[in-house]
Amino acid sequence: MKNINYLNYFFIGIPTLLILLGYLTNQSFGNLVGYGLLFTILTGLFQVIIGTKMSIHEPKDKMLQIYIISVILFFAIWLFNGLFLSSDILYFILLFIPPVLAIYLSIIIYKKRNK
């Protein structure tokens, strides 16, 4: 669990660092900001895989169940909105859910590491 915690710090820290460096250096092309935003895809993939793996090993954990249900609900709403509704407001709301899920899983990992 200690290694997973360190990997989680890495996957959350790198995009944050790249985006901050991009803003601080005031690049005209925004390369660092773009790389940071692209790296968030890997962060999400890592967190979904780790969250699924953890919930398989501990299926009775309520916090992990809430995380997995939230991830499934996020993708279901995203797909439903893309196929049927095409609501810009819903897309805007969905934009803020992945960071909340990343913070939530980070808290779960931190609590499990310090048990």
Image: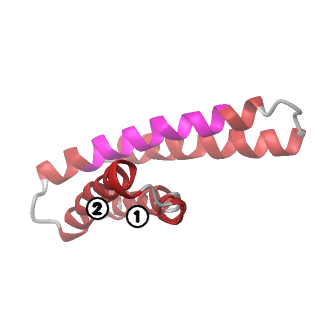
- Nearest the eye: 61 or 31: 31
Q: Is residue 105 left or right of residue 115?
A: right
For residue 67, which numbered disc appears in the image? 2
Q: How many tags in the picture?
A: 2
Q: Secondary structure at mark 1?
A: helix
Amino acid type of disc 1?
Tyr
Viewer-side residue, 70 vs 1: 70
Q: Position of residue 59 (x, y in %)?
A: 10, 58
Magenta segment boundaries in residue numbering: 35-51
Please name the predominant secondary structure of the magenta segment in the image: helix
Q: Is residue 111 above or below residue 35?
A: below
Contact flag, marks 1 and 2 (Cβ < 8 Å): yes
Q: CA distance from mark 1 to mark 2?
A: 8 Å
- Left/right placement of residue 95 relative to residue 20 reads left
Q: Is residue 23 above or below residue 95?
A: above
Closer to the camera in the image, 88 or 39 = 88
Quadrant of res 114: bottom left
- Residue 77 bears which disc, if any? none
